[in-house]
Image: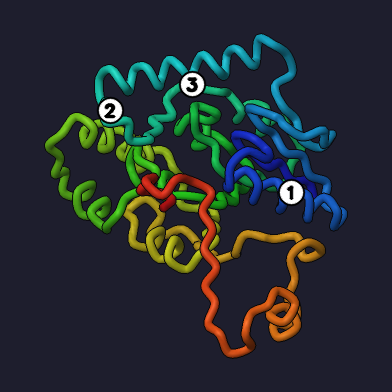
Amino acid sequence: MKVFTFSFNDTKGGAAISAYRLHTILKNSGIDIKMFVARKFTNDESVIGPKNILNKLTQLAKQKICQVFIYIFFNKEKIFISPSLFHSYWHKFINKSNVDIVHLHWINLEFFSIKDISKIKKPIIWTLHDMWAFSGSQHLVYDNSYAFEYKFNIFSSRISKLDYFVWKRKINYFKSNMVIVAPSNWLASSVKQSLIFKTNPVFVIPNPIDIDSWHLLDKNVERLKYGFASDERLILFSCSEPLNNFNKG
């Protein structure tokens, strides 16, 4: 089996790390797999980044032009949104290849356009790391209003109108035969409620971890080692972002 994985980068950010871990697991299991990224940070030869400076500049230019356009006309509140309008023409490369499965991860910042995805003729598995694939231009929606608003076209602000435009493109272009993977039951439930993927097969597959680095230890032994009482209740809190980041905190 031959697999192509696509992710904006390989190891920067939670979505990329999850994608690269899965890529590594499949590669070590004997799968013929390559990972294509817009920004490469590893020395892994199975990860393919931009081939030359022109490719890097083209990707960066698309990204910056889109960000400036959004900021000026739609989004001065700096909500993270992705119209995904600029073509990358990845579909031409994919369709000419002998790949068996295309595995999409986080492919925003103009790495793929919505229309690019629709033109892929190979079987697609899409592992979601946020809500962008089934909402409008926003990556996170904090209630189920996306289903109601998009269905009945209830929009008032400029950002909402952009949302509807992007959502309508997805309705027109995304295919019902894409297999959707969610790393949590909550995200899978949200996918099934959406109008875009309501008929798509959806599976829950948690993000992988390296069990050589992370594994269970004897709780009582570890409590004794660090000086905690055996019956003391402990809470571990960690945060990779400042607490004032609403999306992460």
Residue 75: image tag: 2
Residue shown at 32% from the left, 30% from the top: 78
Amino acid type of the residue tagged 1 in the rendering: His
Badge 3 is on which residue?
63
Q: Dot 3: within a 10 Å radius of its alpha carbon, few (fewer than 14), some, or many (20 or more) residues?
A: some
Q: Residues under labels 1 and 3: Cα distance?
A: 25 Å
Spot occupied by residue 44 in the image (x, y as percentages of width and height) = 82, 36
Residue 23: image tag: 1
Direction front: furthest residue: 227
Residue shown at 70% from the left, 74% from the top: 226
Q: Residues under labels 3 and 2: Cα distance?
A: 15 Å
* Helix, strand or loop for disc 2: loop
Q: Are marks 3 and 2 in contact (CB under 8 Å)?
A: no
Model colouring: rainbow
Mark closest to the chain's N terminus, 2 or 1? 1
Residue 35: image tag: none
Direction bottom: furthest residue: 231
